[in-house]
Structure formats: structure tokens, C-alpha cells
Amino acid sequence: MNDLVADLLAGKHSALARVITKIENRAPGYRDVVSTLHQHTGHADVVGVTGSPGAGKSTLVDKVAAAYRERGLTVGVIAIDPSSPYSGGAVLGDRIRMASNAGDMDVFFRSMSARGSLGGLSTATTDAVTALDAFGKDKIIVETVGAGQNEVDIVRTADTVAVLVPPGSGDDVQMLKAGILEIGDVFVVNKADLDGADRTVQQLREMLQHRGQGERDGRAGSGHHGPDQTAGGTTEDGPATNGERAPGTWAPPIVETVANRGEGVETFLDALADHGDFLDRTGRRDEQERARFAAEIRTLLREDANGLVTRELDRQGGLDRLVDDVVARETDPYTVVDEVLAPLRECLDREA
């Protein structure tokens, strides 16, 4: 174990910051660090907060972190920012979003770049969560970019996903219909003091009831708990979206908050805790963990395989030369791919 890992496990925040920087920059040795930290993980509760820009995600995360601290829990926050198309870094950088927790060393805040990932969650984010978990944070909150339905990537990282919707925005509700609806374990109508909040709550309730009915009719989507696992707000007595549960099912509650005044935050935390209890009681937490690791392994395999292919392309003269040959009709794309992958196939055949 190197000194940096030892310092992180000893609870030194400076080491945690350095490890996450190393992870984010993909600096030499970062994979060994993450591999060593893995055996110290599995204790934190990971909450994903997603929703469209302007929904008030950062303000709510700030208040939630403060509320957790009042309960004596330690908190790690990873806020994903859009990445620069030029540098790959976070566009907004270390913006001030955690005003309520400034100076509290037990709230570790880090802004990270999406690095071009469609869902706003790069592989580095998953590794950073590993670092925070190994450090011993009780609660880890991942706030997404909020760019649209591609936010579904948060499911691969979080135990519980909260979807924020601002009131009076028909476009946001339509966006939920397009995909995000299926990933929400808890829905939050933030800025509930604004006009249109009641209508937004009603729209959400109707959509969740419709989803529950669809799942009962065999038209289920692929929700956070899977098509055969989530009742989508269905109880034994019919659809519900208020947290009622039939055995083994979860009905996503709808919580109203006014985050900038801290209103509804405790109710939101209770909803998150209820979902956590549901995961533990039904064994779904273990199922989700297996699914997340499977997805992570597939992602890393794709990344490493892509790197091997790029090396072989360079060894054979580079992509531009191969394209020249295809344009000149001296070969074709299928033949090029067969030739580039031939050394890899030969290695695998020898091992078989």
C-alpha cells in the first residue's frame, strides 16, 4: 500500500483530494490506487440527484448535506459539470455551490468534468465514489449535469436516484416521459412555492400511476429496479405514488421542497431513508451492486479494448492510411477491420 492510499484510509482529506485528482487526470498509477481502495468499500449510501438545469439540484444538495451533518453523518459530494470540448475539463470549475457547508471538513465537495460522457457521468466519477467510500463517508451524493434523458447513467452509480422537477414546466414533464421517469426512486418538485407546483405534482402522479398500470399489463419499462422488480407505484389496492408498498415493490414518492429555504428537506431525507430500507429488506441493494459492477466491468473492457485497437491501428500505419486504401478501392472497411483485429484473434485462439 502506498503512502497516498494509507493517508486516505487514515482519514486525511488532503490525501482524498489528491487521489481524486489522480483519478480524474488518469495519472499513472491511478488504477492500482482504485484497485487497492476497492476492498475498503461497500459501506456508503450513494444518492444520485438528477433533473433538468434550473431545477435547483445544487441548492437541494447543499441543504441535504447540511441536514445529514446535523444528524452526525459525514458527506461526500461529487458535482458533475459539463466538460469543455477543448480541454475536457469542467466548464464551471469549482463553482461555489455548498455555501451552507463552507468550512465543514466533514462535507467533502468536488466538481468533476463529465469528460464528454453522454450521461454526464464519466468512469472517473465511479472511481471517485470508490475513493469517498473507502475514505469512510457515510453519504455520497452525485449531482448530474442535468442535460436531458441521457442522465440515466446515474443508475449505474447510485443506490437511490432522486429526480428533480421544477413547477410549471410542461417541457420538463415531457422530458420525464421520454426516459428519466423510469429511473426515479424519489421525485422532487422543488421550488414548490411557485405557481404551477400543484399541477406539476398532479402530472407526475398521473404519469407514475400510468406507468404502474402499464407494468401490470406487461408493458413495463426498464426502471431502476428492473421491469420485473418495480411496481412503479402499484400497491395491492391499485396504483399509488405516495410511498405505499405492496410486498417487494417500491412506489416512488413525490416530495415537495423549497430548497433555498430548507423546506421539505427533512421529508426528502426520510423518503431516501425509506428507499434505503426497502433495498435492504428486499435484497435489492445486493442485486443493484452486482448490476453496477457488471456494468463497470463492461465499460472498462470497452475502454481497454479500444486502446488495444488504437495501438494496432497505429502499428499498421494509422487510420488515415487505411482510409486512403479504402477510398482508392484497394480494400474495403470489412477487410480493414478483419486485418486490424487479426492479431487479437490469434492471441485469443492460442489461449483457447
Image (spheres, helix red, strand yellow):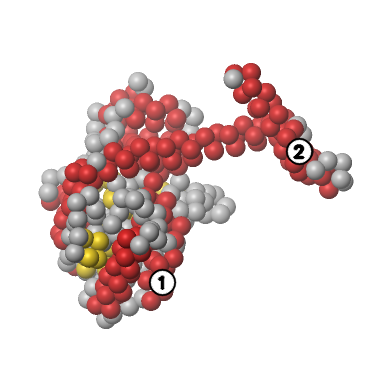
Which amino acid lies under the numbered mark 2 shown in the image of this protein? Val
| Residue positioned 54% across, 49% down in the render | 87
**Side of 332 relative to 208 (left or right):** right
From the image, which quarter does the N terminus lie in?
top left
Quadrant in the picture for residue 202: bottom left
Q: Residue at x 22, y 65 (%)?
A: 238
Q: Residue sitting at 48 percent across and 38 percent down? A: 298
Q: Which residue is mark 1?
A: 174
In the displayed structure, 239 sits above or below 49; it is below
Q: Which residue is mark 2?
A: 336
SS class, disc 1:
helix
Query: Do we see residue 216 in this rendering?
Result: yes
> In the image, residue 38 lies at what x, y percent?
34, 30
Mark earlier in primary sequence (1, 2): 1
* SS at badge 2: helix
Residue 228 vertical position relative to residue 126 in the rendered view, above or below: below
Q: Residue at x 72, y 38 (%)?
A: 337
Q: Amino acid at mark 1?
A: Gln
Per the model, the C-alpha gap separating discs 1 and 2 is 44 Å
